[in-house]
Image (spheres, rainbow, N blue to C red):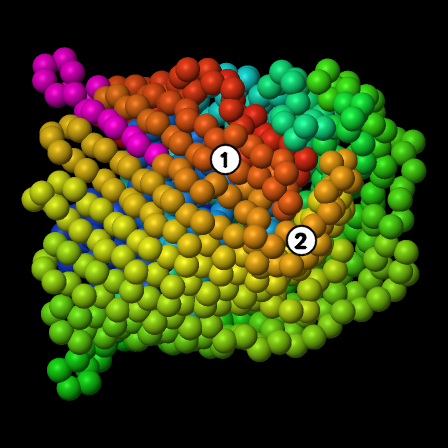
Amino acid sequence: MHTVTTGTFKPIAFAVALACGAPADAQQQAEQQLPEVRATGARVAPGTREDVSSTATKTDTPLKDVPASVVIVSGETLREQGVYDMNRALYNVSSAQALMGGGYGFAHNYTVRGQSVLFLRDGYPDGTAQNGYRRTLADVERIEVVKGPGSALCGSGGAGATINVITKPPSARTLAELSAFAGSFGTRGLTLDAGGPLGPLATRFIANAERSDGFRGLNRDIKEVLPSAAWSIGSNKVLTADFDHREIKTTPDNYGIVFDRSANIAAAPRDARYYSPMNRTDQTIDRLTLAHEWQLGAGSTMRTAFVHDSRDLDLLRNAGGNGGNAAAAMTGRTLREQHDRARYTTLQNEWVFKASTGSVPHTVLAGLQYNDTGIDTTRIGFNLPDIANINVPVVPETTASGLAPVTAQGFNRRIEGSTWAGYVQDQLALSEQWKLRAGLRYDRTRFRDAGSQGTTASREIAATKSIASASLGTVWQPSRDWSVFAGVSNGGFINLSTEPAAVSTEPEKNRQYEAGAKASMFGGTVDSQIALYQVERKNFLITLPGALSATPDGHDRTCGVELDLTARPARGLKLIASAYVQDAKVLSNTIATNAILGVTRSISGTRPTGVARTGGRLWASYQFYGTGANGLGAGIGLTRKGDAFADNLNVYRVPGYTVIDTAVYYRQKTWDVGLSLYNLTDRVYYTNPTFAGALPGEPRSVYLTFRWRPV
């Protein structure tokens, strides 16, 4: 089932679409785009076995027939929980953990199953593999997470999961909603969501603005303009145009609260600051998507897409820094000023058709894809004075003016890459009980990294690599309500990131083995998914203790089991639960040093940074019924994360935590109001490690949201 891409496009694109106006059955097209509607027209609950994920197979395959773990976080769940950011949205996905070291506070990066992830937006690449984008939920319809490498379908896939952010589609029916929210730390925001028919077009326009002073001064200022339109050409063609314009300003912090000489978190208050007061990031992201879908006949579809994504990034942030020494001083602090001008272009053509070999029906997807990357990046590094006492931190610097650049920490480069790819996937129904899926992809990548690096005035790194990715899986359905699946998948890609001082010439590679079961139990009131997995990833970028830049020395393996469950045991009562237990290990024999603690050894056998062994989430909500209570609902959630380490040597340990959140809402036809209370018990906890410290979670905080729908 194809979902009309949402996003936005500028007035010029609107004018072009209007100029091409033609009669259209827009109402029929809008009905086909509802994510909770199966291709048969039967409505099902999001995330259940009968639901369809556009991410898992790119076809209209129910989740019960997919030989992989898939978790869907619906828009209704996000509203019910009062979620306002991506971090909290992914609490609902087993083994998903925020990764501070990959985002530095200005990007949303995560691990799933202890490994990296790939972000898609409406099925197309969105952001880089490292230091990606910060994402709001202003236009999000739902989030689909497919566990394991997705390279066989998506190319440059992360080892842990593919996360597809599906946005709200254009609407052929008039709609309008104005929402406002406000809360702790000076947080406030306003979102307009309007749509309806405009001549032959189904349209949608979303505008979002939000600001926050932020806990510990980590403020944000975000503005987004997100229009989209769909044009139904006759009865079998749909042309969509989206344009996302995002302006994001944040204050980054990659220190948090630092560790002391005893490898404990410093005895400083949780609102203490070690980052430079002039830290800033300023991002402008523009993304244009043009997509055309053509229903060629029964079971046959041609999809063509053009995506151009650009990001201008200006940042000033801390880089190097050590934990406290014997004198309780923080040494080795540095400052990094960087400017990136990145452009990413994707051209894709896919054909989906149904055929039969004797009595065996097939659903075949074949595609061609071209990706082009161009990044101009400059970096200047500065050394900073020490913080004299980490327990009572006073940051000495107030401005970057007057600091002397350190040549060895800088660069001025041009990174280029182009990839041609061909891929095919075949889904076979061998019988009513047995299903098989096989996929194969071939990528040919040419890349170049040229310019100055440190004290080297000019250098060039260039190569051409061929990468093959594959997936193979099977599903056995012993009964209508049970599916048992098993699969293997692998992938690889060249990481064209500006984080390291040089692009690695060796592809990052990954492989997963997985087996599990999906079940609908107790008359369909409980949907569950359990999986056993082993994921391995190598040749990826890591930052070793004492290093100022990432190197491709990463080699990790994770083995584990995870559970995702949704239950509706009684009218109005809903439970969402997830849990995982995993053993993640570093396989690299690279030597690392912590000079402060006097430790030098191989990192082999340690746990990867930021990865917890155990964790889970339980959310319970109840919708009240009866005179005077209709529309009233309440929920409570418990989130657990085990301990993790901030460094590859595993000497800096971040303790685990359990926090409780609550939400109350009241909904009417034209308006609703919601109140969310985070960290109900006001617990001091640390969400994830940085490099020499841990990022403290928010103290008890409250947020109020009001929505008004005049039509």
Q: Residues within 10 Å of mark 2 (few under 14, many from 20)?
A: some
Is residue 336 among what the camera can see? yes
Identified at 34% across, 50% down, the residue is 561
Q: Which residue type does callout 1 highlight? A: Asp
Q: Is residue 604 magenta?
A: no
| Mark 1 and mark 2 residues within 8 Å of each other at the beta carbon | no
Residue at the extreme top: 628
Q: Which mark is residue 289?
A: none
Q: Position of residue 665 (x, y in %)?
A: 29, 20
Q: Residues within 10 Å of mark 1 (few under 14, many from 20)?
A: many
Q: Quadrant of the N terminus?
A: bottom left
Q: Position of residue 624 (x, y in %)?
A: 16, 21
Return the residue at label 2: 602
Q: Is residue 621 magenta?
A: yes
Identified at 73% across, 36% down, the residue is 597
Q: Quadrant of residue 675?
A: top left
In the image: residue 352, left or right of residue 535: left
In the image: residue 678, left or right of residue 355: right
Is residue 301 among what the camera can see? no
Q: Quadrant of residue 122?
A: bottom left
Return the residue at label 1: 643
Q: Position of residue 687 (x, y in %)?
A: 52, 31
| Helix, strand or loop at mark 1 | loop
Range covered by the magenta-colored residues: 617-632
Q: Position of residue 542 (x, y in %)?
A: 65, 52
Q: Say which of 616 and 46 sits in front.
A: 616
Q: Quadrant of the C terminus?
A: top left
Total marks in image = 2
Work out whether 319 lies above or below 10.
Answer: above
Work out whether 189 lies above or below 103.
Answer: above
| Helix, strand or loop at mark 2 | strand
